[in-house]
Amino acid sequence: MLIDSHCHLDRLDLTAYNGCLDTALQAARDRGVGHFLCIGISVENAPIVRAFTERYADVDCSVGVHPLDLTRGSEPTMQWLLDELQHPGVVAVGETGLDYHYQAETAQMQQDSFRLHLDAARTCGKPVIVHTREAKQDTLDLLREAALPQAGVMHCFTEDWPMAKAALDLGYYISFSGIVTFRNAEALREVALQVPSDRILVETDSPYLAPIPHRGRPNFPAYVADVAKFVAELRGVPYEELAAQTTENFKRLFPLARVQTS
């Protein structure tokens, strides 16, 4: 079994599935994907992702505000986060973090929000899902400052090995998306070779970043199988072994997720 550890089901382009999310999820299940973590990115989409967990037994979610959504009127409060995190389908905090590629001028606002999410994670005991882009040092500084006992995951990792090693030393897992399959991602593939087997996850980040051979088209949870097959070949292990290992890693990191054991 595989798990798509990071997808945005509310943003999928379902044209290829006649507008039906049920059909898109079944296409993933038909490829061995047994569970989906749907990610919260704003105050507005929190009720949507929560509703998915009530509709589908194999979908859990997170709640949080993405750093690039902070300027769209979606700035969270601690009380809002803690209230949302009480829902039984919410197994993680985020996604949160820092993104200086698009909005470096909002760095202070992003850092304040990141700290808020990390404090909420400490209070509720749930892991945190971290987005980072062109903010390596500040991200690591804030993670060290928080020193969360349950840590979390560096999702859609695109940085270098020193950052991965620093995050691993803090207890974080490293998740790889379709970017690892891109032709210009040699440095990222070197990271994927070095991450310990018990700390690696795979994801789609769908509808974004479709892996080869789907690059340039909408991404779907079914394509996490392509990411996993690529990473397995890269690491020289059987696909089934990589799938089983990443599933066990997911269950360890997100113990509240309703992953079926069969």
Image (cartoon, rainbow, N blue to C red):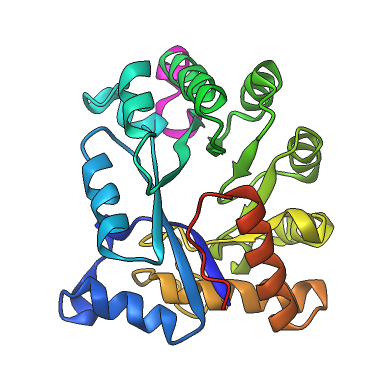
Q: Residue visible at 42% across and 70% down?
A: 221
Give the answer, above or below, for where 37 lies relative to 86: below
Instruction: Return the residue nearer the eye: 194 or 124.
Output: 124
Quarter of the image for the N terminus: give it.
Answer: bottom right
> x%, y% of residue 9?
31, 60
Q: Does residue 143 appear left or right of residue 33 in this picture?
A: right
Q: Return the residue nearer the eye: 187 or 231.
A: 231
Please give left or right for residue 6 compared with residue 21 in the image. Answer: right
Q: What are the residue bounds of the magenta stretch?
A: 100-108
Position of residue 90 relative to residue 226, above or below, is above
From this view, report whether residue 32 is shown above or below residue 135. Answer: below
Q: Is residue 143 visible?
A: yes
Magenta highlight on residue 102: yes
Q: Quadrant of the C terminus?
A: bottom right
Q: Nearer the viewer, residue 225 or 91?
A: 91
Residue in the image at 45% along x and 37% along y: 94
- Which residue is at a point 57% across and 38% down the rendered structure image? 127
Q: Is residue 250 left or right of residue 7?
A: right
The image shows residue 22 at horizontal and vertical percentages of 25, 75
* Relative to 143, 205 lies left or right: left
Residue 185: x and y, percent?
66, 60
- Residue 183 visible here: no
Q: Kindly indicate the quadrant of the structure image that contains residue 209.
A: bottom left
- Residue 210: x and y, percent? 45, 68
Question: Residue shown at 73%/36% (left/top)?
Answer: 167
